[in-house]
Image (cartoon, helix red, strand yellow):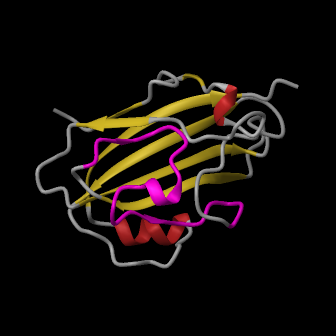
Amino acid sequence: MSLTLTSPAFTHGGAIPARYTCEDEDLSPQLLWHGMPAGTRSLVLIVDDPDAPDPRAPLMTWVHWLLYNLPPAATGLPEGVAADQLPAGTLQGLNDWQRTGYGGPCPPIGRHRYFHKLYALDVQLSDLHQPVKAALEQAMQGHVLAQAELLGLYQKRS
Protein backbone atom coordinates (compact mmCIF):
# COMPACT_ATOMS: atom_id res chain seq x y z
CA MET A 1 0.00 0.00 0.00
CA SER A 2 1.40 3.40 -0.92
CA LEU A 3 1.10 6.62 1.05
CA THR A 4 -2.13 8.42 0.12
CA LEU A 5 -3.36 11.94 0.97
CA THR A 6 -7.01 12.93 0.51
CA SER A 7 -9.56 15.48 1.70
CA PRO A 8 -13.34 15.23 1.97
CA ALA A 9 -13.37 18.95 1.03
CA PHE A 10 -12.12 18.50 -2.56
CA THR A 11 -10.90 15.83 -4.95
CA HIS A 12 -7.42 15.58 -6.43
CA GLY A 13 -7.34 18.12 -9.27
CA GLY A 14 -10.68 19.59 -8.16
CA ALA A 15 -11.72 23.04 -6.99
CA ILE A 16 -10.99 24.07 -3.42
CA PRO A 17 -14.21 25.42 -1.84
CA ALA A 18 -14.16 29.13 -0.94
CA ARG A 19 -14.52 28.44 2.81
CA TYR A 20 -10.84 27.34 2.81
CA THR A 21 -9.65 30.60 1.20
CA CYS A 22 -9.13 34.28 1.99
CA GLU A 23 -12.51 35.02 0.42
CA ASP A 24 -14.36 33.20 3.19
CA GLU A 25 -13.43 31.53 6.51
CA ASP A 26 -9.80 30.72 5.55
CA LEU A 27 -10.00 27.36 7.36
CA SER A 28 -7.56 24.57 6.72
CA PRO A 29 -9.32 21.69 4.97
CA GLN A 30 -9.65 18.33 6.64
CA LEU A 31 -6.82 16.09 5.46
CA LEU A 32 -6.66 12.30 5.73
CA TRP A 33 -3.80 9.93 5.01
CA HIS A 34 -2.99 6.25 5.11
CA GLY A 35 -0.44 3.76 3.83
CA MET A 36 2.43 4.76 6.12
CA PRO A 37 5.60 2.90 5.09
CA ALA A 38 7.44 0.74 7.62
CA GLY A 39 10.09 2.70 9.49
CA THR A 40 8.22 6.02 9.42
CA ARG A 41 9.30 8.13 12.39
CA SER A 42 7.60 11.43 11.47
CA LEU A 43 5.58 13.22 8.79
CA VAL A 44 5.97 16.58 7.07
CA LEU A 45 3.15 18.55 5.43
CA ILE A 46 3.93 21.32 2.94
CA VAL A 47 1.18 23.27 1.18
CA ASP A 48 2.34 25.60 -1.58
CA ASP A 49 1.35 27.36 -4.80
CA PRO A 50 3.90 27.33 -7.66
CA ASP A 51 1.81 29.74 -9.75
CA ALA A 52 2.40 32.99 -7.83
CA PRO A 53 1.62 35.67 -8.60
CA ASP A 54 0.19 34.90 -12.07
CA PRO A 55 -0.13 31.36 -13.49
CA ARG A 56 0.71 32.69 -16.96
CA ALA A 57 4.01 34.13 -15.66
CA PRO A 58 4.86 32.54 -12.29
CA LEU A 59 7.70 34.16 -10.38
CA MET A 60 7.75 32.14 -7.17
CA THR A 61 6.24 29.33 -5.17
CA TRP A 62 4.09 30.76 -2.36
CA VAL A 63 4.15 28.69 0.83
CA HIS A 64 0.79 28.38 2.61
CA TRP A 65 1.50 25.92 5.44
CA LEU A 66 4.44 24.01 6.94
CA LEU A 67 4.08 21.29 9.58
CA TYR A 68 6.74 18.81 10.63
CA ASN A 69 7.27 16.05 13.18
CA LEU A 70 3.67 14.96 12.83
CA PRO A 71 3.56 11.58 14.59
CA PRO A 72 3.33 8.53 12.31
CA ALA A 73 0.29 7.29 14.26
CA ALA A 74 -1.69 10.36 13.12
CA THR A 75 -4.14 9.65 10.32
CA GLY A 76 -5.06 13.22 9.41
CA LEU A 77 -5.93 16.72 10.53
CA PRO A 78 -9.41 18.09 11.23
CA GLU A 79 -10.89 21.03 9.36
CA GLY A 80 -9.78 24.38 10.77
CA VAL A 81 -7.13 22.81 13.00
CA ALA A 82 -5.66 25.31 15.47
CA ALA A 83 -2.07 25.18 16.74
CA ASP A 84 -3.17 23.76 20.10
CA GLN A 85 -5.12 20.99 18.31
CA LEU A 86 -2.19 19.67 16.28
CA PRO A 87 -1.03 16.15 17.19
CA ALA A 88 1.43 16.08 20.11
CA GLY A 89 4.98 16.83 19.01
CA THR A 90 4.00 18.59 15.77
CA LEU A 91 6.07 21.70 15.01
CA GLN A 92 5.32 24.52 12.57
CA GLY A 93 7.33 26.43 10.02
CA LEU A 94 6.80 29.92 8.64
CA ASN A 95 4.57 30.42 5.64
CA ASP A 96 5.16 33.24 3.16
CA TRP A 97 3.05 35.61 5.28
CA GLN A 98 5.88 35.18 7.82
CA ARG A 99 3.64 33.46 10.36
CA THR A 100 2.90 29.92 11.43
CA GLY A 101 -0.36 28.20 10.66
CA TYR A 102 -2.50 27.77 7.60
CA GLY A 103 -3.03 30.57 5.11
CA GLY A 104 -5.56 29.67 2.46
CA PRO A 105 -5.56 30.33 -1.26
CA CYS A 106 -5.74 34.02 -2.14
CA PRO A 107 -4.51 34.31 -5.72
CA PRO A 108 -4.24 37.85 -7.09
CA ILE A 109 -5.00 36.72 -10.66
CA GLY A 110 -5.98 33.52 -12.48
CA ARG A 111 -6.54 29.95 -11.38
CA HIS A 112 -3.73 28.62 -9.20
CA ARG A 113 -2.63 25.12 -8.24
CA TYR A 114 -2.28 24.30 -4.54
CA PHE A 115 -0.13 21.28 -3.76
CA HIS A 116 -0.66 19.55 -0.41
CA LYS A 117 2.42 17.35 -0.02
CA LEU A 118 2.85 14.77 2.73
CA TYR A 119 6.23 13.17 3.36
CA ALA A 120 6.97 10.13 5.51
CA LEU A 121 10.45 10.42 7.06
CA ASP A 122 12.72 7.83 8.66
CA VAL A 123 13.70 10.34 11.38
CA GLN A 124 12.12 12.82 13.72
CA LEU A 125 13.63 16.21 12.90
CA SER A 126 15.24 18.39 15.54
CA ASP A 127 13.46 21.64 16.42
CA LEU A 128 14.24 23.89 13.47
CA HIS A 129 12.70 26.95 15.21
CA GLN A 130 9.96 27.88 12.74
CA PRO A 131 11.89 27.13 9.55
CA VAL A 132 11.07 28.41 6.09
CA LYS A 133 10.36 25.80 3.41
CA ALA A 134 13.94 25.65 2.08
CA ALA A 135 15.37 24.92 5.55
CA LEU A 136 12.74 22.24 6.19
CA GLU A 137 13.39 20.60 2.82
CA GLN A 138 17.13 20.61 3.50
CA ALA A 139 16.60 18.94 6.88
CA MET A 140 14.43 16.27 5.17
CA GLN A 141 17.04 15.42 2.53
CA GLY A 142 17.95 11.76 2.50
CA HIS A 143 15.16 10.87 4.95
CA VAL A 144 12.05 10.65 2.74
CA LEU A 145 10.56 7.15 2.67
CA ALA A 146 7.42 8.07 0.73
CA GLN A 147 5.49 11.07 -0.55
CA ALA A 148 1.81 11.70 -1.32
CA GLU A 149 0.26 14.69 -3.03
CA LEU A 150 -3.17 16.25 -3.18
CA LEU A 151 -3.73 18.98 -5.77
CA GLY A 152 -6.49 21.58 -5.44
CA LEU A 153 -7.34 24.48 -7.75
CA TYR A 154 -8.66 27.92 -6.87
CA GLN A 155 -9.51 31.16 -8.64
CA LYS A 156 -11.05 34.15 -6.87
CA ARG A 157 -14.73 34.73 -7.49
CA SER A 158 -14.37 38.44 -8.19
Relative to 80, residue 98 above or below: below
Q: Is 119 or 18 nearer to us in this picture?
A: 18
Query: From the viewer's perspective, is residue 15 above or below residue 29?
Result: above
- Where's the N terminus, which quadrant? top left
Left or right? Give the position of 140 relative to 9.
left
**Looking at the magenta stretch, what is its main secondary structure?**
loop
- Front residue of 81/68: it is 81
Q: Is residue 103 magenta?
A: no
Residue 66: percent from left, percent from top: 51, 58
- Location of residue 78 in the rendering, given as x and y in whole percent from the top left corner: 44, 40
Q: Residue at left 83%, top 35%?
A: 109
Q: Which residue appears at 69% of the width and 28% of the height?
A: 18
Placement of 114 over or under 102, stated as above or below: above
Report the quarter where the C terminus lies: top right
Magenta stretch bounds: 74-98
- Residue 54 point in image, percent of width and height: 79, 40
Q: Nearer the viewer, residue 97 or 53?
A: 97
